[in-house]
Image: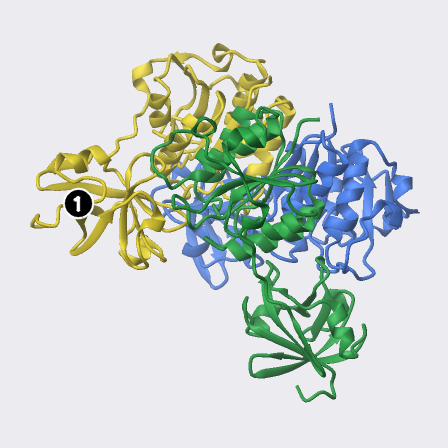
Chain colours: A blue, B yellow, C green
């Protein structure tokens, strides 16, 4: 089987950027199926891109991952190709790849892409997705290049990490943060069910959710449909994290919640 | 030839949902081409999703259809796999599949997907598209499962239908409804040309179109370009239904028309 | 290898139009990979569509290009299939194809698609993308039709050109125009670096940029990251044209610039 290429970016779908990158990939590795993870990462949003990639990675086929959210394009940030047990990750060294690489067991080798012979000599220095990353990904997928053909090996520990906020368990509360709002308005937090259990909460429980200065009462349920319209549903989402939904409407709007805001959980009796 | 999979959802393209489902499909049936029908059905919009699927179905390649607009995910609504002469339809039992299944000649067998061995044991109960529907669609496309492997057969007549409003011919008027506004602002109604002919209208005629409390004069034309700027074009659209366009602008905005609003048609002499 | 089909349109991704066209292509040429260039050309935007196609063409694989931005659908504008050294271009005769055809060396033959046997007899006259252009593109890609099967040859010189504004060098100024704003808010002009050099500007120079009635100071840099937040970066973009970016924000918003507005460049000492 040819090697598939999974592709994530912040290029959007309005311009021809994604199509151009796919054209480059096809010209180098025509038998590779390209799976679009998403191209609507917020422009320059390295952290949301890293989170999306890490949520997706375990469902993608082993092969090559091409990820480009690259506000530092054209500067000294390094273009990298990373070997893992899953396959190769190709993208900028800005933390974008790190959580997904960690999820598949870490890097076994990291090379900086410096060889001009594996790049497309395009005008400008603003589209490394096309000129640097896509050719590298295509060559690796086609088996026409080894990591060492792309450029020198660099120290594994020099890979820029993605620092993600951890929830804090301070009984009777769990203090976390909203870190993703999906298309349906559901709000994922960085809190896991195990943290809620550490403060005595159990599935089925009523609980208190504090968002900024407001306090809401919700219920730990299994599915969106388990709450009435307007009721706050606290649930384990498809990534295994505690998320907020509201029956019949968008939770982000109902709770005035955006990515990065603090969210605390506690029992009804806690002084939330 | 491998079996293609046509895929429709309300997942949007901002999050990684569509990419994750395609990853699952690829891992199970790598040779299947996946055709995206659309993923921007309005969130939870079962009826617009059903209409889009029924408009598309006759142009799609026979094979597997995966359709997920599923506001009841995680509740007792049944996940289904439906056999037809076209191939298999996989999706929730909420009316989404019914019009398209009817258009290809109806179901020959319906099975509820209940076998945990054909599901992905993911966290949460909010992403059956990934955990239940995609594996079923992939296994059917790959020929690695029969319907009976997915779960028990259920009664054909238990399939939830999609109730669609019919136009009413009440001479001198035809009373219908707007049921789709496309990206260009063209408004499709549930009225067919045969209904207009029942009240004496013919292609080329001037006619009266009543939208809510306002009355507009238009002309039954063949193409958008047949009317002047600002003129109302009544035409048979690409699905064979009577639709409204306005020369040089968006009909939905010009007529203040949204999906679900009443639209009536009559001749110039009718008391519209 | 099967022939790939690169596909550009203004159909958007909200409706099922793109999926339907791909269904038609698959039914005719199932082995052809379809590369989506973009489907979010502004509705009816023949010129932005032509520019996007011409920016993309050199990165796409030789084969068939299907391009549909077709405000005149159903009128007397001609549906065309154009032979070039790159392969076939299929689309409406409204200037959409012309710049890309020119970039690949021009047309060797142009045929009007008139043969009803190569069309899908769909209802209405509003979706030639599905009924006329997709079948022609699919048949050419599958090798099941020659140009002469589609309809009569027409005169090469009858192809409608796309008139694009040229920049004017009027020392000490270069007078140009904004002609594309990308998803990041970067503004491409129709000015090339060679024009700036004609008025004495060099990479690294400070320069003056006049937008409408306002004058801004900027610097000719290599990469976005070479300027501080709020600073105006003048650079050669990925298509080889002079473009404007602003550190840390969107240039289009910061400069109140939209497509079609006049942009002038000069040295700091020029009376800009």
Residue located at (73% from left, 73% from top): C228
Q: Is residue B127 above or below residue C166?
A: above
Residue C156 x/y as whole percent: 59, 46
Residue located at (67% from left, 27% from top): C2
Disc 1 designates what residue? B265
Q: Is residue A64 above or below residue B213?
A: above
Residue located at (49% from left, 48% from top): C69
Q: Is residue A188 above or below residue C252?
A: above
Give the SS element for disc 1: strand
Chain under disc 1: B
In the picture, residue A53 is in which quadrant?
Answer: top right
Q: Residues within 10 Å of mark 1 (few under 14, many from 20)?
A: many
Viewer-nearest residue: A182 or B1: B1
Residue C139 x/y as whole percent: 56, 28
In the picture, residue C203 is in which quadrant?
Answer: bottom right
Left or right: where B12 falls relative to A58: left
- Quadrant of the image for the N terminus of chain A? top right
Left or right: where B230 falls relative to A156: left
Residue B127 x/y as whole percent: 51, 34
Q: Is residue C8 above or below residue C200?
A: above
Viewer-nearest residue: C94 or A1: C94
Residue B14 x/y as whole percent: 54, 47
- Asked whether residue B9 appears in the rendered view, the answer is no
């Amino acid at each position: 089987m040819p090697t598939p290429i999974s592709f994530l970016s912040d290029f959007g779908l309005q311009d021809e950027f994604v199509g151009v990158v796919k054209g480059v990939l096809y010209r180098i590795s025509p038998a590779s199926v390209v799976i679009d993870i998403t191209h609507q990462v917020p422009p320059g949003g390295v952290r949301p891109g890293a989170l999306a990639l890490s949520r997706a990675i375990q469902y993608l086929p082993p092969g090559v991952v091409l990820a480009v959210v690259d506000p530092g394009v054209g500067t000294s940030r390094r273009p990298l190709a990373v070997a893992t047990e899953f396959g190769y990750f190709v993208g900028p060294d800005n933390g974008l790849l790190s959580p997904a690489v960690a999820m598949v067991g870490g890097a076994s080798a990291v090379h900086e892409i410096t060889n001009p012979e594996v790049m497309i000599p395009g005008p400008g220095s603003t589209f490394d997705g096309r000129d640097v990353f896509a050719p590298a990904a295509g060559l690796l997928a086609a088996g026409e290049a080894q990591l060492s053909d792309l450029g020198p090996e660099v120290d594994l520990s020099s890979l820029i990490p993605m620092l993600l906020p951890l929830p804090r368990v301070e009984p009777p509360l769990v203090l976390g943060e909203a870190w993703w709002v999906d298309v349906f308005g559901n709000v994922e937090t960085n809190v896991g069910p195990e943290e809620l259990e550490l403060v005595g909460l159990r599935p089925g429980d009523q609980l208190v959710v504090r968002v900024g200065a407001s306090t809401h009462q919700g219920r730990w349920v299994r599915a969106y449909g388990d709450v009435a319209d307007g009721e706050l549903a606290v649930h384990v989402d498809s990534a295994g994290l505690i998320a907020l939904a509201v029956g019949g409407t968008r939770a982000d709007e109902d709770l005035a919640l955006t990515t990065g805001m603090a969210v605390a959980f506690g029992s009804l009796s806690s002084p939330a």
